[in-house]
Image (tube, rainbow, N blue to C red):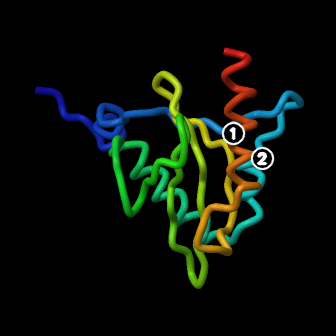
Amino acid sequence: MKNRDKENDDDENLRFQVNFFKTENGKQPVRDWLMELSHEDRKVIGEDLKTAQFGWPLGMPLIRKLDNGLWEVRSRLDKRISRVIFTVIDNRMILLHGFIKKSQKTPQRDLNVAKQRLNALTETK
């Protein structure tokens, strides 16, 4: 029997490829938002996204369904919380919108941004 390295094992357990939503002009708003965060915050969010990527389907407290075709990854950062709203299309987890959450409820403005990006994706599909 052939020995496999960890990377190959990870590939076999992979549920989704993770992709960033791209605007018509090629920008990746979630990637840009992540790059503005500290290294520590990016690491926490990245680990949570990886857990979702490999463990799908998951529920609370990490993943919460927001609307038809929209879920959020809920990350606890140092003294604040973040959300990454995503959708699943085929075998892809597409990151639509990311933000630092400042209120109990997901702000309608942030939900609307994610819905607009989801609509843009489904229109081009």
Q: Residue at x 75, y 57 (%)?
A: 33
- Quarter of the image where one finds residue 102: bottom right
Q: Amino acid at mark 1?
A: Lys
Residue 88 vs residue 9, the one in the foreground: 88
Q: Earlier in the sequence, mark 2 or mark 1?
A: 2
For the residues labelled 2 and 1, say whether their Cβ atoms are less than 8 Å apart. Answer: no
Q: Quadrant of the N terminus?
A: top left
Q: Residue at x 75, y 27 (%)?
A: 120
Mark 1: which secondary structure?
helix
**The residue positioned farthest toward the top in the image shown:** 125
Q: Is residue 96 left or right of residue 73?
A: right
The residue to which callout 1 is attached is: 115
Q: Residue at x 43, y 54 (%)?
A: 63
Q: Quadrant of the C terminus?
A: top right
Position above or below: 98 against 53: below
Q: Residue at x 30, y 44 (%)?
A: 6
**The residue positioned farthest toward the left in the image shown:** 1
Tell me the tag on residue 29: 2
